[in-house]
Amino acid sequence: MKVYIASSEKHVGKIEEDIYFCKKYNDLNIETKIETIENVIKKAKSNDIVILKSIWGYYNDSGLFLQQIKKLQKRRINLVNTYKFIYWNIDKIKYLKDIKNLDIIPTYPIDINKLKTKDKLEICIQKIIKNINTSEIVLKPSIGESGYLTKKFNKEKDYKNIVRFIIKNKNTKFVLQPFIKEISEGEISVICINGIPVYGIRRYPGILSEKKTTEYIEKKYLSKKVINTSKKVNDFLSKKFKSLPNICRIDFVNTKDSFKILEVELIDPDLFFRKIPENIKQKAFSLLEKSILK
């Protein structure tokens, strides 16, 4: 058995977290390599393990990415997280709808493929923004990450710009969400390993607010609301899929009402190992090792 840590061509062997994983598995006498998905498909054999890590950019051609994942599945190569979680998590329209009862940010899909004319698109946007009670709104792709094509608009003044931006990127499905001004206080990301919340991260991605230094949060300092909602997400996943994801990152924003879920990341979650203490890093890896190698 070999372990492959899948990365994008641009980032192979350059990401601290990938290198850490590679060294730790090699220390366990398990041959481990960091490779592109293309090379993994060529080299991996049945019962090898593939961990999707720094594959950033897969959303630029999600169709190709899914083809690659299906090739791995057809060859019975073990994937972390398993295939069912990847297929479910790739599209925000699908998975946020499934967890709509778990305190998510209101999310409204816009499927350009079903809106054949500019007039129909404008009518669709008008209906959506009437349901959003903030003056500013966020437009983002239903398949994407790291702020890809994510824009903030004033829903009244920038209305025409929203329509133009969607038409310009006509091959992309988008969602609209209210802009939460408390995002300036940072997003809270909870890292769960095999369903267990292990630690938190306060981060300021710099997409919708000022970029600031990422901060580690010890689990005991995370709010009860965040911990409880994280457990509810994992309970939902366990019930739906009869198993838990090995790695899960749940992103929250603290609104004036309560903490709400921004996103759930199961495909290639950054675990921010570069920002956490060594003992927590080792604990997280130990939990992950046990769930992957069992």
Image (spheres, grey):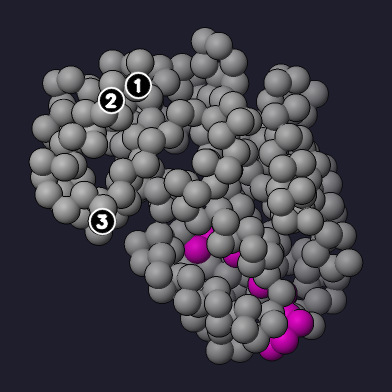
Identify residue for label 1.
Answer: 132
| Residue pictured at 67% horizontal, 36% vertical | 190
The amino acid type found where label 3 is placed reads: Asn
Sequence-first tag of 3 and 1:
3
The C terminus lies in which quarter of the figure?
bottom right
- Is 125 positioned to the left or the right of 28 in the image? left
The amino acid type found where label 1 is placed reads: Ile
Identify residue for label 3.
Answer: 113
Which span is picked out in magenta?
Answer: 45-55
> Does any portion of residue 56 appear in the rendered image?
yes
Q: Residues within 10 Å of mark 2 (few under 14, many from 20)?
A: many
Number of numbered discs: 3
Check residue 47 for magenta coloring.
yes
Look at the numbered discs 3 and 2 and tell me whether their residues touch, using CB distance below 8 Å: no
| Residue pictured at 30% horizontal, 29% vertical | 128
Q: Residues within 10 Å of mark 3 (few under 14, many from 20)?
A: few
